[in-house]
Image: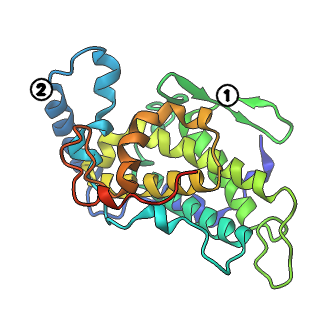
Amino acid sequence: MLGDHSSLPTDRALLSQPPKTGLSCKMVLQAVGKVLRKSKAKPNGKKPATEEKKMYLEPEYTKSRITDVGFKELVVLPREIDLNEWLASNTTTFFHHVNLQYSTISEFCTGEACQTMAVCNTQYYWYDERGKKVKCTAPQYVDFVMSSVQKLVTDEDVFPTKYGREFPSSFESLVKKICKYLFHVLAHIYWSHFKETLALELHGHLNTLYVHFILFAREFNLLDPKETAIMDDLTEVLCSAGGRGGGGGDGASGGGTGAQNHVKER
Ligand SMILES: [Zn+2]
């Protein structure tokens, strides 16, 4: 048992809350069934088993955003703001948003439906404080992630909020660790719960969050490219044209905003 992960009323409550959409579980399941039937009607070419699962790559869904703000400009460190403050503030915000996004589908992410924390062919394991590998279901893994991140972002020694307090020397590596975990959760939502997200009509929110998060992590080298390679196909589609959307896989619909893609690449 991991005794340290118990005192988190806020986010545990969040995770157990049903989505605040006014939709019942039955309605969502019906909508999911509809989406599935629709997707089956489309011939998918080669590798049907894998491709069919990647519904999130379909242009009609990848175009969906809740804003067309240029995230590439938004993630850049503003002048006069301390780098660590910027990392701390954004990391905490991403944590809350990923937690919220996961809470909308958490009732479908059960120990039975998601027996392992799997994304594509990769399976993630949790490691406890002693570095011991813990075999767990996806909801348990997400709970470990949310609990440990909550503990970090509320630890005054790690994420100081009071004037005059310094960030620890390990701050950047801890932020990287948090980003890695949040990426796992986002990837799991896409891989295993995209159809429910679609049925809830929250795919625009998910895409927007993903783009913002990935571009932020890229700007400050917070994620190992090897770690994120698993979702490279989605990242490429979503983050082209500065992540503004409209850049569907066919390349024909990305006009208009693409020309503004002038921010320096690093
Ligand atoms: Zn799941």
Which residue is the site of mark 1? 135
Decide if residue 109 is in sight here. Answer: no
Q: Residue 132 in the image: state x and y as whole percent.
A: 81, 31
Dot 1: what SS? loop
Q: In this view, does 58 lie above or below 171?
A: above
Q: Residue 165 in the image: state x and y as whole percent.
A: 86, 78
Q: Disc 1 beta carbon < 8 A from ligand 1?
A: no
Q: Which residue is drawn at 51% across and 51% down?
A: 214
**Left or right, residue 61 beside residue 102:** left
Q: What residue type is labelled 1?
A: Lys
Which residue is the site of mark 2? 41
Q: Residue at x 40, y 56 (%)?
A: 242
Spatial CA span between label 1 and label 2: 37 Å
Near mark 2 (Cα within 10 A), the count class, few <14, some 14-19 or many ≥20, is few
Q: Which residue is drawn at 63% across and 32% down?
A: 136
Q: Residue at x 74, y 60 (%)?
A: 151
Question: Front-most of 34 and 234?
Answer: 234
Task: Please identify the quarter of the rendering in which residue 58 is found.
Answer: top left
Q: Residue 102 in the image: state x and y as whole percent.
A: 47, 52
Near mark 1 (Cα within 10 A), the count class, few <14, some 14-19 or many ≥20, is some
Q: In this view, does 257 lie above or below 78?
A: above
Q: What residue type is labelled 2?
A: Ala
